[in-house]
Amino acid sequence: MPQNPIPEARLRDRFAAFLPNAEFLHAEECHGGHINRTFFVDARVYGQQRRYVLQSVNKNVFKNYAGVMENVFRISAHLGRKSLDVGSDDPTRDHIHFIRTADGGMGVDGEIGFWRLYRFIDRAEGRLRATTPHEARAAAAAFGRFQWLLADLPTPRLWETISAFHDTRQRFANLEASAGADAAGRLASVRDDVDAFLALRPEALKLQEAFERGEIPERIAHNDAKYSNVLMDTATNAAVCVIDLDTCMPGLSLHDFGDLMRSMSCDRPEDEPDVSTIAVRRDMYDALVDGFLSQAGNFLVPAERGLLPNAGVAITLETGSRFLADYLDGDHYFHIDYPEHNLVRARSQLALARSMLDTLL
C-alpha cells in the first residue's frame, strides 16, 4: 500500500537542520525500500549543485534507533579513516558519508521517524539480482572487504539493533511454538513441511554451535548481504561500496557469507513455486567463495573457512523456518502478495538448502 506523501515543506525543514545555508532545489522519493522513507534531494551548496539522501528511519521497526544511528556513524567514520590508511582509489565514494546536523547531532527526531542525511554516491546504482559469476564475485568481494575494514573497529561493542537476529536455535523453537499453537489453523496441511525443517535442525545449527564452542569468533556483520546492497559503478560494473548499514551489529562473518549464498547461488527467486527448478549453481558458489576470500581471507580463522558451505545451508534454513512460522501464525510479519506466499517461500528455501547439502557438502 502506498504511503502518504510527505509535504515538501517538511522535507525542506528537515534538510535545513543539516545544511542551513544550502539552497533546497528539489526532492524525489525513492520507492525501492520497504522500511525507511528515502528521498533524493538536489541542493545548491557554495554555488555547486549536489545531491543528498534524506532518510526517515522507521522507529517502529528500529525501536533502538539511537543505537542504529550510533552504529552507522561509528562505522562511517571508521571506514573513512581506513580508506586513507589502505590507499583507497576514491575515498569519496567507497563508503557512506553521514552528515551531522548544524548543532552536531546525528539527526532530527520526528513523530514516526528519525531523519538523517548522507551524501549521494554518483555514477553508481543498486541492482536487484546477480546473474553472472563476475557479478557474484564482485558483490562477495565487497562484503569481504567491508568485514576486513571493520575488523579493527575500536571498542565499545556495537549495539545489537535487532536482538537475537541470527539466534538459529530460537528461530527453530519459534517454528515449533507456532506449530503447537496453530493460530491460523494451517498445521494439518503443512505438517510435512514442519517435520522437514525440524529434521534439518542439526545442519541449521552448525554455525551457532561452532561459535558456542569457541571455534569461530564474533565479528561485525552486515546481516543483509545481498546484491542490491552493493552499489555498482555504472561505467565499469565494479563494486563501489556496501550500503544499508542499519542491521550492522555483532554477529558472525559466516552470517554474511550465508546470506550471499542464499541470495546469489541459485538463479530462481526466493518465492519460486516450482521447487523442482531450484538448484545451486556451482559456478556462482565458486565465484562467491573466491570473491569473499580475496578480501576476508587474511583474517578468517581456519574453522570459518571450513564452514563456508555450511553457512548457506544454515541461513537458508533459518530464513525458511521464519517464513513457515509466519505462515502458521497467520502472516503477520512478512509482506505477502497472496495467501500462501509465505508457504511458497518456505518450501523454496527448503529446496535450496537441500540442494546445497547435496551439491556442496
Image (tube, rainbow, N blue to C red):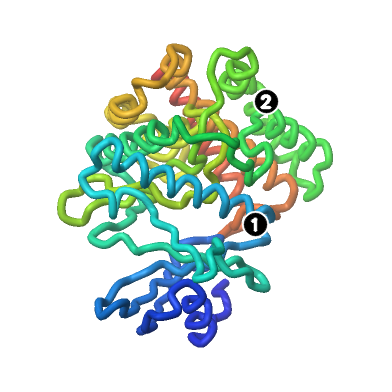
Relative depth, front residue between 248 and 358:
248
User: In this figure, which residue is indicated by the disc labeled 2?
Assistant: 198
Residue shown at 43% from the left, 48% from the top: 77
Residue 213 against residue 125 in the figure, above or below? above
The CA span between labels 1 and 2 is 29 Å
Tags 1 and 2 touching, CB below 8 Å: no
Q: How many marks?
A: 2
Q: What residue type is labelled 2?
A: Leu
Closer to the N terminus: mark 1 or mark 2? 1
- Determine whether, in the image, residue 122 is placed left or right of residue 114: left
State whether residue 319 appears in this view: no
- The part of the image, by quadrant, that contains residue 217 is top right
Q: Quadrant of the N terminus?
A: bottom right
Residue drawn at the location 53% of the way across and 51% of the way down: 246
Q: Relative to 78, is 64 on the left or the right?
A: right
Which percent across, then down, holds residue 266?
Answer: 38, 36
Disc 1 marks a residue whose amino acid type is Val
Q: Where is residue 354 in the image (x, y as percent from the top left)?
A: 49, 25
State the residue position of label 1: 61
